[in-house]
Amino acid sequence: MANPDTLPPNEQTQHPKRKRTSTKPPTTSITLSNPHWSYIHLQHLPSTTANSNTTPNTTPLDAPTIHLHLRSALTQFLGLHGSAIAFDILKIEHHNVWLRVQAEDRVAFVAAIGGWVGKDGREGWRVKGWSYWDAGGGSDGDAGGLFD
């Protein structure tokens, strides 16, 4: 066996260095740059009753009525293109409605709905807020039980 003192320095036996294992978990980054959906919060502005110009009509909203109102607004504002815009009614609570619309249709949808006036100018919709990520529609309204 060779004497370690006579071997060149690079051939001397050395203990391999231990690599320290990282205690941090690996970081993963995800970017969602193009959301597919927009969530919109609308408030229905009811017409006044025929008996009194100051008392609002308190008839509860239902999904078919909301769908007809919104489809009418889209068709009046955008014609055939407006009638092709798809939307989903997520929640109805009193005069508040939460919707889901494709993200690329959001601007046209909000413009059409916000400018619509029905029933002799006494009924309409107010856009309370919208968001790409929050189903509450970016508004101060309570959408906590939206998916209950």
Image (tube, rainbow, N blue to C red):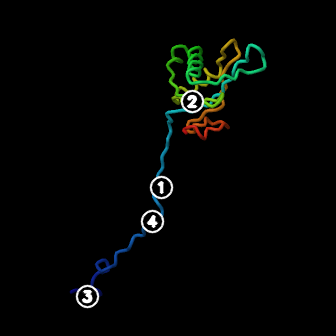
User: Measuring 50% from the left and 39% from the top, which residue is drawn there?
Assistant: 33
Q: Secondary structure at mark 3?
A: loop
Q: Amino acid at mark 3?
A: Asn
Residue holding disc 1:
27
Q: Amino acid at mark 2?
A: Leu
User: Of callouts 1 and 4, which one flags the residue occurring earlier in the amino acid sequence?
Assistant: 4
Counting from the top left corner in percent of width and height, residue 31 is at 49, 44
Residue holding disc 4:
22
Hey, which residue is sitting farthest left in the picture? 1
Decide which of 137, 9 is in the foreground and name it: 137
Task: Classify residue 7 as left or right of residue 140.
Answer: left
What whole-number distance in Å separates the C-alpha atoms at marks 2 and 3? 83 Å
What whole-number distance in Å separates the C-alpha atoms at marks 4 and 3? 39 Å
Decide which of 100, 14 is in the foreground and name it: 100
Q: Secondary structure at mark 2?
A: strand
How packed mark 4 is, by other alpha carbons closer than 10 Å (few <14, some 14-19, many 20 or more), is few
Counting from the top left corner in percent of width and height, residue 51 is at 76, 14
Q: Amino acid at mark 4?
A: Ser
What whole-number distance in Å separates the C-alpha atoms at marks 2 and 4? 46 Å
User: Of callouts 3 and 1, which one flags the residue occurring earlier in the amino acid sequence?
Assistant: 3
What whole-number distance in Å separates the C-alpha atoms at marks 1 and 4? 12 Å
> Is disc 2 in contact with disc 4, using a CB cutoff of under 8 Å?
no
User: Of callouts 2 and 1, which one flags the residue occurring earlier in the amino acid sequence?
Assistant: 1
Q: Quadrant of residue 133?
A: top right
User: Measuring 66% from the left and 15% from the top, which residue is drawn there?
Assistant: 118
Residue holding disc 2:
99
Foreground disc of the pair 4, 3: 4
Foreground disc of the pair 2, 4: 2
108 shown above or below 5:
above
User: Measuring 65% from the left and 22% from the top, which residue is drawn there?
Assistant: 114
The dot on residue 3 is 3
Counting from the top left corner in percent of width and height, residue 7 is at 27, 83
